Image (tube, rainbow, N blue to C red):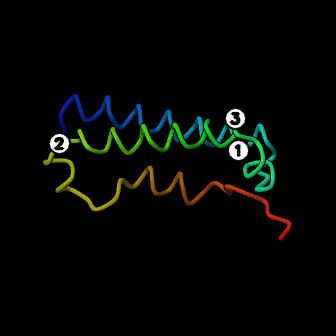
Amino acid sequence: MKNKDIIVLKKILEYCNQVSEACNMFDNDYDKFVNISVFQNACCMCILQIGELCKVVSEELKGQAKAIPRFSQFMSGIKIFNSTK
């Protein structure tokens, strides 16, 4: 794995942690997400940045796996919203 890939993956993980932090800050509440633009922007900006960073991962790394295991484990381990609906 190239050094650049390591840097990019660390940044992606940081953004994932920021999404988790924002969700925790707003009690993982879907209604708050729908009604509070600051919450929406915090999450959406991180997701946008993750998408942009995914574009610069080397072809070598992309060819190694269809999903990044640690990222997949992280995302499957967090509960995004508690919905009362």
Residue 1 x, y percent position in the rendering: 19, 39
Question: Residue at coordinates 42% horizontally, 37% vertically from top-left?
Answer: 49
On the picture, is 71 further left or further right than 5?
Answer: right
Q: Can you give x and y, in whole percent of width and height, for residue 19 in the image?
A: 60, 41
The image quarter containing residue 82 is bottom right
Which three-letter amino acid code belongs to the residue tagged 3? Answer: Val
Q: Is residue 74 above or below residue 7?
A: below
Label 1 secondary element:
helix
Numbered badge on residue 52: none
Residue under label 2: 58
Q: In the image, is residue 85 above or below residue 4?
A: below
Q: Which residue occupies the extreme right position in the image? A: 84
Q: Which residue sits at x=68%, y=38%?
A: 22
Q: Residue furthest left?
A: 60
- Cα–Cα span, label 2 and label 3: 33 Å
Closer to the N terminus: mark 3 or mark 1?
1
Q: Nearer the viewer, residue 46 or 16?
A: 46
Q: Is residue 32 left or right of residue 19?
A: right
Q: Image height check: is 3 above or below 49?
A: above
Say left or right for 33 vs 64. Answer: right
> Which residue is denoted by mark 3 in the rendering?
38
Q: Which residue, given by chain and number where applicable, does mark 1 sit on?
A: 23
Q: Secondary structure at mark 2?
A: loop
For label 1, the crowd category at 10 Å Cα-Cα, with few meaning under 14, some 14 to 19 and many 20 or more, is many
Q: Badge 2: few (under 14), some or many (20 or more) residues near its Cα, within 10 Å?
A: some
Nearer to me, 30 or 5:
30
For the residues labelled 1 and 2, the Cα–Cα distance comes to 30 Å
Three-letter amino acid code of the residue under disc 2? Ser
Which amino acid lies under the numbered mark 1 shown in the image of this protein?
A: Cys
First in residue order: circle 2 vs circle 3: 3
